Each structure stands twice: as C-alpha cells, then as structure tokens.
Image: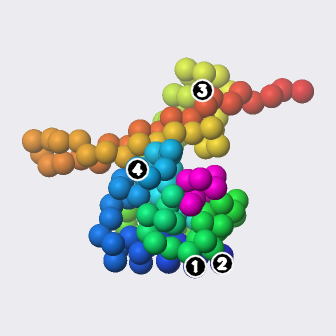
Amino acid sequence: MNKEEMKDQIRTAKLEKGLSWQEIAETTSMSTEFVVSACLGMNHLEKSDADAVAACLSLSSPVSTALQQYPNKQWEQTVPTDPAIYRLYEMVGVYGETIKELIHEEFGDGIMSAVDFNMTVSREKSEKGDRVHLSLSGKYLQYSSW
C-alpha cells in the first residue's frame, strides 16, 4: 500500500467513525499535529503508534505498515491552490524576508530547522472573531564557513 492509498483509507475511516484527529492521536504517544501529518503521508509513525492508529480506525495491517514507511516529502504544485494552504504561502511571501531578517538579527547567519521542529494549531478567542493560532518552533542551525 502506498501513502496515497493509506491516506484515503484513513480519511474514509475517520469520517465513517465520526472521530476527531485529537481522538485518534490520543491513542498514540504523539501530538495531534504530528499524527495528522503522518496520516496524510508527510511523516511516519513508529510501529506501536501506527498500530494504535490502525486499530482505532479498524483498518488492516497494511495501513499500519504504510504509516511506518518513511515519506517522500514533495509537492506537486508550485503554489497550491487550496485556500487554506495558499494563505500559508501568502504569509511566507509577505513576511518571509521579515522573519529571515529577525532570525539573523537574533541568532546570526542560519536557519530554523523543519526537521527538529514542533508545531501547534489552536483556536484563539477574540472579540473580532475567532483566530487561528499557529506556533512554529524549530531548532536554530548555524551556517558553516570553510
């Protein structure tokens, strides 16, 4: 089973069972955000967590096996057209240089890792309407000189 087939089976079972991502993630040792990423094919789970997800969704062992496989992290579109994903590209397009400049001023010449990385997504109540709160935390990696 490939990652796309796995993703389709997981999404279908999630919908049929009426489960939230949080409920599925609670059967594992991982965060909701990481479990969702693995279920969508962009990360992998260790066997115990992959088995827990498959069992929670009453899916067969090939789904667990696919969850354990290392992903091929590539995108098919230059800029995705899905509005929620496109807006993230828009944020980086508008604020990317600002973020880069502030990282360099605070840390020096380097980058924020997307490998040693944490993320949370939550709802933030506001008088002007609820807001999406994204928290991104990556290890600072200094560029080497030689």
Earlier in the chain: of badge 2 and badge 4, it is 2
Tell me whether the residue at label 2 lies in contact with that at label 1, contact meaning CB atoms closer than 8 angstroms.
yes
Q: Which residue shows up at 65% across the image and 67% down it? A: 65
Q: Which mark is residue 26?
A: 4
- The amino acid type found where label 3 is placed reads His
- Horizontal relation, residue 29 to residue 68: left or right: left
Tell me whether the residue at label 3 lies in contact with that at label 1, contact meaning CB atoms closer than 8 angstroms.
no
On screen, residue 145 above or below 120: above
Q: Which mark is residue 5?
A: 1
Furthest toward the left, the residue is 127
Tell me whether the residue at label 4 lies in contact with that at label 3, contact meaning CB atoms closer than 8 angstroms.
no
Earlier in the chain: of badge 1 and badge 4, it is 1
Q: Observer-nearest residue: 123 or 78?
A: 123
Q: Position of residue 142 (x, y in %)?
A: 71, 27
Distance between the alpha carbons at the discs numbered 3 and 1: 41 Å
Q: Which mark is residue 104?
A: 3
Q: Which mark is residue 1?
A: 2
Q: Position of residue 135 (x, y in %)?
A: 41, 39
Q: Residues within 10 Å of mark 1 (few under 14, many from 20)?
A: few
Q: Which residues are magenta?
A: 42-51
Kindly indicate the quadrant of the structure image that contains residue 145: top right
On screen, residue 106 above or below 138: above
Distance between the alpha carbons at the discs numbered 1 and 4: 23 Å
Q: Which residue shows up at 58% across the image and 79% down it? A: 5
Earlier in the chain: of badge 3 and badge 2, it is 2
Q: Residues within 10 Å of mark 4 (few under 14, many from 20)?
A: some
Furthest toward the right, the residue is 146
Look at the image and say whether residue 123 sits in the magenta stretch. no
